[in-house]
């Protein structure tokens, strides 16, 4: 149980530090999908 808690805390810290990178990657993915949709019309 203690190992699960410490790994969850580590993952939470990692996401807290890198949330802007995840947002950046998500924005690029949405832009590519929108471009593919517009290109298929």
Image (spheres, helix red, strand yellow):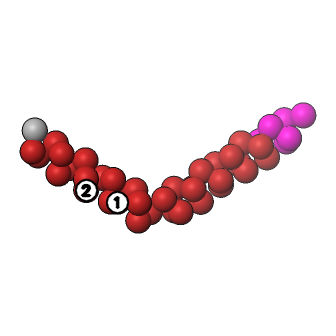
Confirm or deny contact between disc 2 and disc 1 (CB under 8 A).
yes
Residue 3 versus residue 22 in the image, above or below: above
Tell me if 40 is positioned left or right of 4 in this view: right
Residue 23 versus residue 4 in the image, above or below: below
Tell me if 40 is positioned left or right of 25 in this view: right
Residue identifier under label 2: 10
Pick the residue in front: 39 or 28. Answer: 28
- Residue 40: x %, y % from top left: 84, 35
Q: Residue at x 41, y 65 (%)?
A: 17
Disc 2 and disc 1: Cα gap in Å? 6 Å
Q: Residue at x 30, y 52 (%)?
A: 11
Q: Residue at x 73, y 50 (%)?
A: 31
- Residue 15: x %, y % from top left: 40, 56
- Residue 29: x %, y % from top left: 64, 48
Q: Quadrant of residue 41?
A: top right
Tell me if 2 is positioned left or right of 17 in this view: left
Q: Quadrant of residue 38?
A: top right
Q: Quadrant of residue 34?
A: top right
Q: Secondary structure at mark 1?
A: helix
Main secondary-structure element of the magenta-colored stretch:
helix
Residue identifier under label 1: 14
Image quadrant holding the N terminus, namely: top left
Number of marks drawn: 2
Pick the residue in front: 40 or 12. Answer: 12
Residue span colored magenta: 36-41
Q: Secondary structure at mark 2?
A: helix
Q: Residue at x 16, y 42 (%)?
A: 4
- Numbered circle sitting on residue 22: none
């Amino acid at each position: 149980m203690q190992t699960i808690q410490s790994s969850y805390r580590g993952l939470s810290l990692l996401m807290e530090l890198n949330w802007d990178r995840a947002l950046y990657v998500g924005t690029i993915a949405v832009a590519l999908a929108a471009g593919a949709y517009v290109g298929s019309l």
